[in-house]
Image (tube, rainbow, N blue to C red):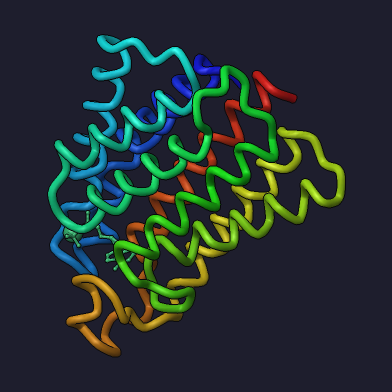
Amino acid sequence: MDAAFFRTWMTEAGTVIEAQRDHLTQLDAAIGDADHGINLARGFAAITAALATNATPTPGSVLVLAGSTLISKVGGASGPLYGMALRQAGKSLGDTDEAGLPDLSASLEAALAGVQKLGAAREGEKTMVDALAPAVAALQKAIAEGAGAATALAAAAAAAAEGAQATISMQALKGRASYLGPRSVGHEDPGAASTALIMGALRDVARREAP
Ligand code: ADP
Ligand code: MG
């Protein structure tokens, strides 16, 4: 998976987030301040623009630029958290021209560690961690079982989607939604939902370009 693969992942994630912008914002309206879709759509549009105007010769440079762009363009909790995730993922890839599946897995592990370092959320607290952590675990398991990129990333995306659904029954213990206490139960976490979309974009790009 080369730099072009990662650029395609980021721009396709932007397309999906733009298409789901109102849905993500509605999820945030229920338990937050109704800006998650707006925040992320703006951030990913800025990523697409930054990738079009800056040289990103390596996979790592794509993700570092994407993360830095989110940090500078998106306020709220999710900008710095996704920005940290992408920057850490990019740093973990180093300056290799071609990332293998184990490299990608390690980079997503680094993304998760970055989110948890910054946001201190554990699994079960109704955040993006509840989609990202199962995705990382599913990817590691699929690789250990010998799966190729398309199959392994399909498993990761499915685990992220399941993880996002599982946030419905959770009470929020981190972020703005935690102010609602038990009233946060019964709604999908917007950040977990957007993580599932981003992992879905990765699955789709891999199915086409790295089967
Ligand atoms: P804000 O909450 O500032 O309005 P957004 O609406 O863009 O920011 O993002 C909200 C999402 O951020 C939540 O749905 C949750 O997934 C994620 N989030 C909030 N706080 C944390 C945290 N401490 N750790 C991980 N994710 C978090
Ligand atoms: Mg919000």
In this picture, is 76 found above or below 182?
Answer: above
The quadrant in which residue 102 appears is top right
The residue sitting at 72% across, 33% down in the picture is 150
Does residue 152 appear to the left or right of 52 in the view shown?
right
Residue that protrudes farthest toward the front in the picture: 95
Between 130 and 101, the one nearer to me in the picture: 101
* Percent of width and height locating residue 11: 39, 24
In this picture, is 2 found above or below 104?
Answer: above
The residue sitting at 23% across, 32% down in the picture is 69
The quadrant in which residue 88 appears is top left
Q: How many marks?
A: 0
Between 205 and 5, the one nearer to me in the picture: 5
Say which quadrant the C terminus sits in. top right
Say which quadrant the N terminus sits in. top right
Find ligand 2 in the image and state its quadrant. Answer: bottom left
Does residue 18 appear to the left or right of 111 in the view shown?
left
* Percent of width and height locating residue 87: 36, 40
* Percent of width and height locating residue 110: 49, 50
In this picture, is 62 found above or below 198?
Answer: above
Does residue 151 appear to the left or right of 93 in the view shown?
right
The quadrant in which residue 56 appears is top left
In this picture, is 109 found above or below 178?
Answer: above
The residue sitting at 38% across, 78% down in the picture is 186
The residue sitting at 86% across, 50% down in the picture is 145
Residue that protrudes farthest toward the right in the picture: 146
